[in-house]
Image (tube, helix red, strand yellow):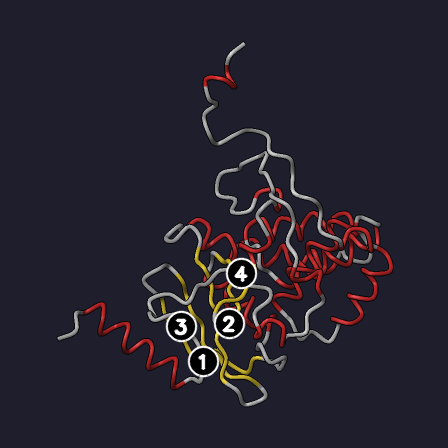
Amino acid sequence: MATGKEAFKSKFCIFLILLGVQVFAFSSCETIRSFWKPKDAFIKSLDLPDWVLESSIKLRIFNDSPNVINPEDAMPEDDIASYGNQLRVLLAVSPAAMRDIYEMAGCLDGSDLIKVRGNKMTDSGEDIWFGVCKSGAQDAIVFRVLEMGNNQLYYLYEEELIKTWDESKKNAKTNPDKSMRLATKIIEHEPAHPGARRLLGSLYLKTGYCPGAVRNYRIYLRILPHSAEKSKIDSLLKKSCGDTLVPKKPEPKEFSDELPTIEESAP
């Protein structure tokens, strides 16, 4: 006889099958997370530019602020937006933000999201949202939930960050510096916000700051791999930021994880 957890997992797997979502790269349906594999056949089928599939060198956080998920936007790109078992896997905090992100991101096939059908939490702290696409297809998106149960962060998005996003958009042309500061505040709390990522990519590109433009457009195109702007963004970055698109060499090792031998430590 199946235990409560096993029964839940079986029903959850059946639910995904009925939706037409392919999530069976692993033997268990308890979690659908997988390692970032840019060379997978599925990811290749998305036809993303090579620089989108690259990742920045290890990032360091110099200023850790309380109740800020992604201070100074220093979180690795692969932790913010990647793919697992043919689904997008994104970081998020607030359920309200998850809904907005899903609506902005649309369906993985490139069509608009018509409606959200529901969501399911997994044992591993992931919140899977299911949607219906304008194309008629079924869709799902995985949110890796950070700071589970932090009500202060939940309400921050609804009470403050939605207004912050509206203000950022209003200032994009008239006061780009202010717009950039506001958009940065959003991604420090909701790193996978595609609207803020697209806006920051554009503003950084206009100011000639290529690392910022590449980082934000990289995350944006991972979230919207079939964006109508994909070719245009690729051309602009190759023209203006060609050197930045080439991955940097690994950082030199600053310390050894292993203890030195007697010979090495002798004067």
Q: CA distance from mark 2 to mark 1?
A: 8 Å
Q: CA distance from mark 3 to mark 1?
A: 13 Å
The image quadrant where one finds the N terminus is bottom left
Q: CA distance from mark 2 to mark 4?
A: 12 Å
Left/right of residue 246 with respect to residue 265 in the rendered view: right
Which residue is pictured at 64% across the width and 58% down the height?
165
Q: CA distance from mark 3 to mark 4?
A: 23 Å
Q: Nearer the viewer, residue 168 or 266?
A: 266
Q: Are marks 2 and 1 in contact (CB under 8 Å)?
A: yes
Q: Which residue type does callout 1 highlight?
A: Val
Q: Provide the secondary structure element on which disc 2 rests.
A: strand
**Within the image, what quadrant is residue 77 found in?**
bottom right
Q: Residue furthest bottom?
A: 136
Which residue is pictured at 39% across the width and 79% down the height?
16
Q: Which residue is mark 3?
A: 119
Q: Are marks 2 and 4 in contact (CB under 8 Å)?
A: no
Q: Which residue is mark 4?
A: 36
Q: Nearer the viewer, residue 192 or 29?
A: 29
Of pointers 3 and 4, the one earlier in the residue sequence: 4
Q: Provide the secondary structure element on which disc 4 rests.
A: loop
Q: Provide the secondary structure element on which disc 3 rests.
A: strand
Q: Nearer the viewer, residue 1 or 73?
A: 1
Of pointers 2 and 4, the one earlier in the residue sequence: 4
Mark sitting on residue 87: 2
